[in-house]
Image (cartoon, grey):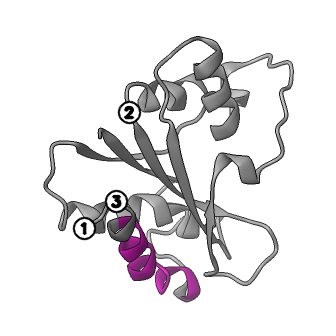
Amino acid sequence: MRTIVLGLGNPILSDDGIGPRVIYDLQKQIDDPDIVLLEASLAGMDLMEMLVGYDRAIIIDAMRTGGQPGTIYQLTPEDFPTQRTDLTSQHQLGLLQALQLGKELSQPMPERIAIIAVEAEDIYTFSEEMTPSVKQAVPQVVGMVLSDLGL
């Protein structure tokens, strides 16, 4: 089963770097040609194109819901409200819209999608350091991904 593990975020915007940081740690532990580890700070059609051709996707990202920083959420696309808007730019596509568009365009999109999101405290400060509560979540997220992969 071809799997992509995708860490979304910007590694120089404090807690927004959780996705790339998890990918960095996973690269030290995973050596399987059927598992692709990538980090990205993009959206829209570029994000959709990254997911094409995989059977399964595990996506790691920061999230701001007002919850306790460092809280880890295990989600699927079905956990989010479905909303289709008239888009005037491909950059308006978020993850869910990218998945939906890929399917509408008959692209081979992942059938199994797991989203691991970490409640962020600070996504605005230019820093390669995450806040302590988010940094503490990294090993647990790495373990969750390894478990999901059966490793």
Residue 19 horizontal/vertical position (percent): 46, 60
Mark 3, secondary structure of its residue: helix
Rounded to the nearest angstrom, the CA distance separating label 2 from label 1 is 19 Å
Residue 100 horizontal/vertical position (percent): 67, 27
Is the residue marked by circle 2 packed among few (<14), some (14-19), or many (20+) residues within 10 Å?
A: some
Check disc 2 and report the residue beneath it: 54
Q: Is residue 4 left or right of residue 47?
A: left
Q: Earlier in the sequence, mark 2 or mark 1?
A: 2
| Most common secondary structure along the magenta stretch | helix
| In the foreground, 59 or 20 | 59
Q: Is residue 135 magenta?
A: yes
Rounded to the nearest angstrom, the CA distance separating label 3 from label 2 is 17 Å
Q: Is residue 131 visible?
A: yes
**Quadrant of the snapshot with the N terminus:** top left
Check disc 3 and report the residue beneath it: 23
Residue at left offset 63%, top offset 29%:
98
**Quadrant of the snapshot with the C terminus:** bottom left
Magenta residues span: 133-145
Residue type pointed to by label 2: Tyr
Mark 2, secondary structure of its residue: loop
Residue 134, relative to residue 85: is it above or below? below
Mark 1, secondary structure of its residue: loop
Check disc 1 and report the residue beneath it: 151
Figure quadrant of residue 57: top left
Residue at left offset 39%, top offset 36%:
55
